[in-house]
Amino acid sequence: MDIQIADSRPPTVSNGLPRRGDLQTAAEFHTLSLQIGEADGRSIERRRRVFQSLRRLPRWRELLYTLVPIFTAHQQRERDEQQREAAYLQVADDMRLLTYHLLEVDELLMHLGTSPVRGLEGAAVERRIARHGPNSVSPPSRRVALRVFSWFFAGFNRFLWVAMVVFFLCWKPIGNPPQSGNLALAIVIVFVICLQASFSAWQEWITHRAMHSISSMVTAETTALRDGARVRLPQRELVPGDMVFLQPGDLVPADIRLVDVSLDLLLDRSALSGAPDPTIGTTGYTSTNYLETRNMAMMGAHVAQGQLTGVVVATGDRTVVGRISQLVMSKPPGRTILQIEVHRLVNWLTTVSLAVGTLFVLLWAVWLRPKYPGFMSVSDALANGVGVLVTF
């Protein structure tokens, strides 16, 4: 039976927030920061050419990749890398155009249509929720159909399906007379495949339930200013223009421009940037780089010390965490060392079983059948050959 190892690693973004110490998120953050900081006109022009060239793939090349599958894997890998680079460049270019950190506070509040005294009105909140959606990062696609397919056909299961078909054919029409034992073996193999698929589904369900219980422990409320009063709101209901108030230990619920801060304000951005030490928060910009300036608090950061008042400038997938999450989800998921070793073991066993089963059928066809014609029929030879394969 094939061995399926469920990926029990926590997702990069859980409940819309990155995990503390996530090296992959930090790497994506610094990559975007470096690309945003580049001001060389030649590099910007090169980015545009790369991005446009991906849209103008020659038709003859697409047709060649379709008709000649032997080149598909290499060309697809190359194209995936180009598309990933183009996605990085597109995100970096979009974030380079953001100027929330460069505007004066009064100008920014006017731009967002909010008031530092009354905050947002109820009607304005409803319109912005309809326009921007909830303040949560989109979860990765479950791909249910692909998962179900992998449960039934991944690993050694594909050879079990072949064995089932062979046993069924050995029963009818190859078997003369039909032998009920071959039909029973075909049914048993189908039962084994379903049992293996059920075990894989149970593993994934247990992992998903555990991660959901962990993410549900996170407090998802923040203090915001609505209609002139401070209220506690679920983080999902925040919209651009909301005035929020954070205390020590609070989680930054969205991308926030700092409006008023205490002198001892420190922001812990280790979950996002990987920086081990908290950074000082200020109301004035310290860098033209959107990711490096200290008058911005990004979703996923913690208030390590002090207090702050800020205005929400981006929510959900429009935040830095949301953009990084989309980049991470666009990358094919990697496998753990244990999964690689188990996959290698399954491939080795599969190769040996195929070699032994093929050798058995060849010996029967070349030597045993000519010398002893009535010793073993065609259906018996195929059934025994597949039995050798399944035994492994």
Image (tube, rainbow, N blue to C red):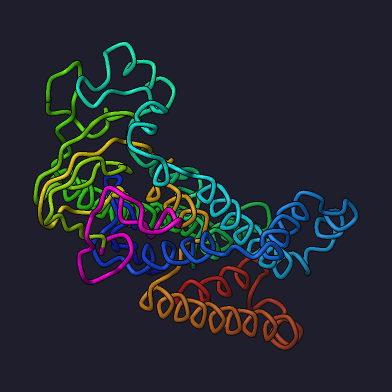
Is 297 in front, or is 104?
Answer: 104
Residue at coordinates 20% horizontally, 52% vertically from top-left? 210
**Is residue 319 shown above or below 235?**
below
Give the x, y percent position of residue 43: 67, 65
Image quarter hosting the N terminus: bottom left
Horizontally, residue 351 falls left or right of residue 117, namely right
Residue at coordinates 54% horizontally, 84% vertically from top-left? 352
Q: Count of labels shown? A: 0
* Quarter of the image where one finds residue 83: bottom right
Prevailing secondary structure of the magenta residues: loop
Image quarter hosting the C terminus: bottom left
**Is residue 338 shown above or below 208?**
below
Residue at coordinates 16% horizontally, 37% vertically from top-left? 245
The span shown in magenta is 270-295
Give the x, y percent position of residue 161: 54, 58
Residue at the limit of the structure toward the right, as seen here: 60
Give the x, y percent position of residue 139: 38, 43
For residue 26: magenta?
no
Give the x, y percent position of residue 18: 29, 55
Is 307 in front, or is 35?
Answer: 307
Horizontally, residue 254 falls left or right of residue 112, namely left
